[in-house]
Image (spheres, rainbow, N blue to C red):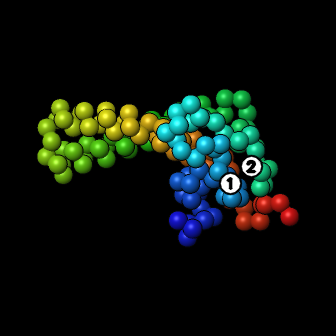
Amino acid sequence: MSLLKGTKVYSIFTGTCPVCQEESMYRQNNPYKLREVFEMHERCSNCGTKYKIEPSFFYGAMYVSYAVGVAFSVAAFIIAYVFLNATLLASFFTIVGTLIIFMPVIMRLSRNIWINFFFSYKKNSGKA
């Protein structure tokens, strides 16, 4: 994954600061600790980037979450229906199960994608 450092893809999949990509934006790296899934640092300790630009900034991530959820659903359907030859009903339950199991991951990915719309990587953005 270090080959992708400096790209938005790296920041999205690792959950690191979109500007310096040196520190995780989240207080808890494990998204399955549900009480802390939304807990973020206020600023990056490396470059000082403020993550929450304005109040309710991450409400926009809900729209991204819809698209990410659809992508997970399509992937689950193709795996269940095409590759495993499941019935339509079984495929439906596979989609529902996938969305429930991956809900914390989808929420984090959506936030990561959303914040990367507004910030770009700067190679020498860390503290001197």
Q: Position of residue 124 (x, y in %)?
A: 77, 65
Residue 126, by quadrant, is bottom right
Identify the residue shown where x is 52% and y is 41%. Answer: 31
Residue 108 seen in render: yes
Q: Secondary structure at mark 2?
A: loop
Residue density around tag 2, few if under 14, some if 14–19, many if 20 or more, within 10 Å: many
Considering every residue shown, the one lying at the far bottom of the view is 3
Instruction: Specify which label sits upstream in the sequence, 1 or 2.
Output: 1
Q: CA distance from mark 1 to mark 2?
A: 7 Å
Residue depicted at 83% across the width and 60% down the height: 127
Whether 93 is drawn above or below 15: the answer is above
Work out which quarter of the rendered image holds the C terminus and state it. bottom right
> Who's the residue at 29% across and 44% down the image?
76
The count of marks equals 2
Residue beneath disc 1: 23
Q: Is residue 49 above or below residue 37?
A: below
Q: Amino acid at mark 2?
A: Cys
- Image position, residue 55 (x, y; %): 71, 29
Residue that label 2 marks = 44
At mark 1, the secondary structure is loop
Type of amino acid at the residue the image marks with label 1: Glu
Q: Dot 1: few (<14), some (14–19), or many (≥20) neighbours within 10 Å?
A: some
Q: Is residue 116 left or right of residue 108?
A: right
Q: Is residue 120 visible?
A: no
Comparing 110 with 42, the one in front is: 42
Q: Is residue 110 left or right of residue 17?
A: left
